[in-house]
Amino acid sequence: MIEPVAAQSLGSWLKEADRCVRIWEDRWGDFEIHPSLRVDHQALGQAYEEYLNRLTDNYPFFHPRYAGQMLKPPHPVAILGYVTAMRINPNNHALDGGPATADMEKEVIVKISRMLEFSDSALGHLTTSGTIANLEALFVSREEHPEKAIAVSREAHYTHARMGHVLGVPMEKVETDSEGRMDLNALEDLLQDSKVGTVVLTAGTTSLGAVDPMDEAIPLCRRYGARVHVDAAYGGFFRLLIHSEIIDAEVSKNLDAIKEADSVALDPHKHGLQPYGCGCIVYQDREVGRHYFHESPYTYFSSNDLHLGEISLECSRAGAAAGALWLTLECLPLLADTGLGPVLASCLEAAQRWHVALEDTPLKSWKKPDLDIVGYFPDTGSSTASGIDQASQALFERSMASTENPIFLSTLRVQSSDLQERMPSVEIDQKEVRILRSVLMRPEQADYAEALVASLVGFLEVDV
Ligand SMILES: *Cc1c(COP(=O)(O)O)cnc(C)c1O
């Protein structure tokens, strides 16, 4: 049905998508849109103009200058995949809602399971977000260990505590070291009193991309009979690089150990090049599917095969999200040396170069980055925590406000005692202190790291 297209731009592929979906639509015979759905083109033109203008009120998420939060536009292939399926709008809840994209979802789950070195019999599905993926894992944990608590580290994503509240499960906090990784002595103390049924480990914390010491933590949890869920929403895809030189050996070992977990949550809408609306949960043991069992009077009719809604807590989900991920992984497969691997390797390189470029500047790196997020603080003469806090905020504001040379950053609150480990002379006059944080998830940023750091240092010198 689809002829190959010579043109390269996304615009012409989108036109092609429209043409092909129309051909498919025409197969079903004459059809006219109801008059009530027609819009006045002039009114649309005006509204659209306003829409476009309003959308300019955004930060340039695509650009190397944007080194703020975890976001960037999806890959053009993902946009093409999404928009094409969205024209049809399948719902991946049930096979009745869209058999093609449901099959694609099952195929991408197999690919992701293999990346995790889970068996092909692993059970998984896409979700709307990492939060929902984690909620599902915590729900299964509660069903498996009904009377027990769930332990998360101090640096785990804040939604774990909220979801524990939603599920009515007591949550225990585990201390971290000053680099943001779970403290295993603290974990063992907690496991010893046997109230904990599940431990959540994080592969890439949201604050600074720290990877928990999974290699030791997982056997420790096993000794005490605890389940292990890995929140790899941010860092899961970096598992592709565990045999590569670019990644720190210790971090590789810990990402490698993810294969021993009971469940893993990932966010294709972070490092999988997808638009928002694409999280993922995978379970090692298919049998946990029984916890999802429910009856639905209006779905699951067209096939006796597994309907994705039978193994997920959500009902409607965009088939387009599965289609977009499927198409993306056809073009950028989950491999180390080609496909997604080199994209992620460049992001790691960007963070490592940023970390090195900070040496011999008044900006001090918080730690050697595990992944592609760097933390740093201005050491420009202030001897108090509050002074460092204000200097961070001032640099943040100046750099964001620059009209000629803006660099978009984020700030992060850390404990002043952790700052003191790096700056023994600092006087702790407040409990927490803001530092700067840069998420370098654009592969292009590798070649900009030194220039961007030099610009930031320039913003500092305005004060001197
Ligand atoms: C982003 C993130 C989440 C939350 O995922 P959403 O897709 O934003 O709901 C959870 N855990 C970690 C480690 C994350 O980075």
Image: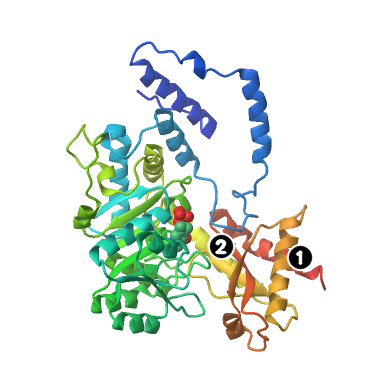
Say whether mark 1 is within 8 Å of ligand 1.
Answer: no
Q: What is the spatial separation of the Cα atoms under label 2 and label 1, in whole angstroms?
A: 21 Å
Badge 1 marks a residue whose secondary structure is helix
Badge 2 marks a residue whose secondary structure is helix
39 up-or-down from 191: above or below? above
The reply to whether discs 2 and 1 touch (Cβ–Cβ < 8 Å) is no
The mark found on residue 350 in the picture is 2
For this view, does 353 lie left or right of residue 127?
A: right
Report if residue 80 is visible in the image: yes
Asked whether 328 or 258 is in front, the reply is 258
Q: Earlier in the sequence, mark 2 or mark 1?
A: 2
How many numbered discs? 2
Q: Position of residue 429 (x, y in %)?
A: 68, 83
Residue in the image at 76% along x and 65% along y: 459
Q: Which residue is mark 1?
A: 459
> Quarter of the image containing the C terminus?
bottom right
Q: Amino acid at mark 1?
A: Phe
Q: Residue 212 is drawn in which quadrant?
A: bottom left
